Image (cartoon, helix red, strand yellow):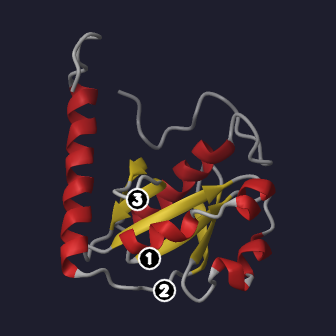
Amino acid sequence: MPDADQAPSEPIVSSCGPPGGAAAVARGIARLFRRNQIWVASEVALPNGRRADLMGIDARGQIVIVEIKVARGDLLGDAKWGEYLDHCDRFYWGLCPALDAGLVGSEAFLPDVTGLIVADAYDAEIIRPAATRPLAAARRKSETQRLAALALRRLNLMQDPPPPDEVY
């Protein structure tokens, strides 16, 4: 099994275009979070039908969501991101270095609430910390259980892939 910190075999371009893109930004953020005891999963479905790019749990049990953007149009045209706030204690924007970080400083992006991380495939930096908005205990429990089940399901399927005809 390859080392998780091993450099990818394909080059990563700094513009966040292929082959870098959102996957490169997610990798850099995951590395930053890992050093800070925040464990994340990618592409996590939420009960409201949305999908978080990264969602995880920190050492205190707080839920963190990161919405990754690598294109200006995608960032400015995203009207759904506010629906993530009810499912986390802290929300971050994850941007590639080529995007103007000032874009998420306007009031439309709730800079008093949302944090900002700039990342490439190798690392990330928190530019603006996210405010902590504690979840209700029942919501925290359900989100934590969902994340745990997702992580265990992914680990199990990685260790023992099912046959093509098996539905899980």
Q: CA distance from mark 1 to mark 2?
A: 6 Å
Quadrant of image for the C terminus: top left
Residues packed near mark 2 inside 10 Å, few (<14), some (14 to 19) or many (20 plus): some
Q: Residue at x 71, y 52 (%)?
A: 70
Residues packed near mark 1 inside 10 Å, few (<14), some (14 to 19) or many (20 plus): many
Label 1 sits on residue: 90
Label 3 sits on residue: 55
Q: Using residue 39 as the reference point, say whether residue 136 is left or right of it.
A: left
* SS at badge 3: strand
**92 to 123, vertically: above or below:** below
Q: Measuring from the top left, give residue 112's x and y in whole percent.
A: 59, 89
Label 2 sits on residue: 131
* SS at badge 1: strand
Q: Residue at x 22, y 38 (%)?
A: 153
**65 to 109, vertically: above or below:** above
Amino acid marked by disc 3: Met
Q: Using residue 116 as the reference point, say whether residue 104 is left or right of it.
A: right
Q: Quadrant of residue 47?
A: bottom left
Q: Residue at x 25, y 10 (%)?
A: 165
